[in-house]
């Protein structure tokens, strides 16, 4: 089982938009050293919408090679066409990825039955696990808990990244699916709350900026949830919850301000300020507006990030 802090990795680019492979390798090393438990290349944060298919496949391959088996690699391979999602997922599988992260189809707004058949068809084509990804704020498509429960019965589908930020929605999925589906938070601001309800980790934007601290928050939260289940460990559970919340409070500014403009605009700017990537980002995404730079810097300092 993949647990803990999972970074939705930014894709380093040069000023002209070309991919920066040297910085990509350096980011992978930094995340592993910082305690990140798994890496997601070419998700939304990795600008999957603006890299072409050969680049997409090469990014996954390069990250797999750089990781070299030390942590799981969950390749972002979602698409709004089932055939394209299968093509990207098979390429990731052949590159050695440990799992795929599959966002709900965007723009074309399928029905719940269409979603079920989309993911079921992809699962039938793959031999590595798949994690579903529901983020209706970006896709205009909301996969309901009942559909997630149906997909939990499909071989190969092992989890979901739920990014609505609605705790009741997430707990409903946990109740409906039991141990057939692992739930990951896809909303940094509510990730600790969800972990305390039984989610196994967070697929995080904040982890790009404060990976060590975010990893600690996730581990404390998971330990607290486990302690709550053991009779006589209520006091220990409360201590762990208090420690997790105290640490997470230092990250709240990042959880909020990394979304002052569309992801990944703020997070790429933040990682650039840390000297870990250049200033490349592909249109139609642009560099962070001047008026938002100070709030992002302030959140970074609150989190103890060196800038």
Image (cartoon, rainbow, N blue to C red):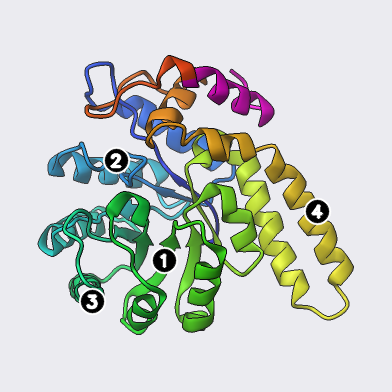
Which residue is the site of mark 2? 62
Q: Quadrant of residue 54?
A: top left
Give residue 120's mark: 3
Rounded to the nearest whole Å, what is the CA distance between mark 3 and mark 4? 41 Å
Classified by dominant secondary structure, the portion drawn in magenta counts as helix
Q: Secondary structure at mark 4?
A: helix
Rounded to the nearest whole Å, what is the CA distance between mark 1 and mark 2? 25 Å
Q: Residues within 10 Å of mark 4 (few under 14, many from 20)?
A: some
Query: Mark 3 near mark 2, Cβ–Cβ under 8 Å?
Result: no
Q: Is residue 15 above or below residue 21?
A: above
Q: Quadrant of the C terminus?
A: top right
Give residue 160's mark: 1
Which residue is the site of mark 4? 242
Q: Nearer the viewer, residue 144 or 271?
A: 144
Q: Residues within 10 Å of mark 1 (few under 14, many from 20)?
A: many
Rounded to the nearest whole Å, what is the CA distance between mark 3 and mark 2? 28 Å
Query: Mark 3 near mark 4, Cβ–Cβ under 8 Å?
Result: no
Q: Which residues are magenta?
A: 292-307
Q: Nearer the viewer, mark 1 or mark 2?
A: 1
Question: Of marks 1 and 4, which one's residue comes earlier in the chain?
Answer: 1
Rounded to the nearest whole Å, what is the CA distance between mark 1 and mark 4? 27 Å
- In the picture, measured across the screen, residue 6 lies left or right of residue 103, that is right
* Residue 75 visible in the picture: yes
Give residue 96's mark: none
In percent of width and height, residue 281 lies at 29, 25
Q: Quadrant of residue 41?
A: top left
In percent of width and height, residue 58 lies at 21, 41
Question: Of marks 3 and 1, which one's residue comes earlier in the chain?
Answer: 3
Rounded to the nearest whole Å, what is the CA distance between mark 3 and mark 1? 14 Å
* Residue 1 visible in the picture: no
Q: Secondary structure at mark 3?
A: helix
Question: Of marks 4 and 2, which one's residue comes earlier in the chain?
Answer: 2
């Amino acid at each position: 089982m993949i647990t803990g802090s999972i970074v939705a990795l930014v894709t380093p680019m040069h000023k002209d938009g070309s991919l920066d492979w040297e910085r990509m390798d350096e980011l992978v090393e930094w995340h592993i050293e910082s305690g990140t438990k798994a890496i997601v290349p070419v998700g939304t944060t990795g600008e999957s919408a603006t890299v072409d298919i050969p680049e997409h496949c090469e990014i996954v391959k390069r990250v797999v090679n750089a990781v070299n088996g030390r942590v799981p690699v969950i390749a972002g391979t979602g698409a709004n066409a089932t055939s394209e999602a299968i093509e990207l997922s098979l390429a990731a599988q052949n590159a050695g990825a440990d799992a795929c992260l599959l966002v709900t189809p965007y723009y074309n707004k399928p029905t719940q039955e269409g979603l079920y058949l989309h993911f079921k068809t992809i699962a039938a084509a793959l031999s590595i696990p798949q994690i579903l990804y529901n983020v209706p704020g970006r896709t205009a498509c909301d996969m309901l808990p009942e559909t997630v429960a149906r997909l939990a019965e499909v071989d190969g589908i092992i989890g979901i990244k739920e990014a609505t930020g609605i705790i009741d929605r997430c707990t409903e999925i946990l109740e409906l699916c039991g141990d057939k589906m692992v739930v990951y938070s896809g909303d940094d601001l509510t990730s600790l709350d969800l972990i305390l309800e039984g989610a196994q980790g967070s697929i995080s934007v904040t982890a790009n900026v404060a990976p060590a601290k975010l990893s600690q928050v996730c581990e404390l939260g998971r330990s607290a949830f486990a302690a709550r289940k053991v009779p006589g460990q209520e006091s220990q559970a409360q201590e762990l919850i208090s420690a997790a919340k105290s640490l997470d409070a230092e990250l709240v500014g990042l959880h909020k301000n990394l979304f002052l403009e569309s992801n990944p605009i703020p997070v790429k700017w933040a990682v650039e300020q840390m000297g870990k990537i250049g200033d490349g980002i592909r249109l139609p995404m642009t560099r962070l507006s001047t008026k938002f730079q100070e709030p992002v810097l302030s959140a970074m300092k609150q989190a103890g990030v060196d800038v």
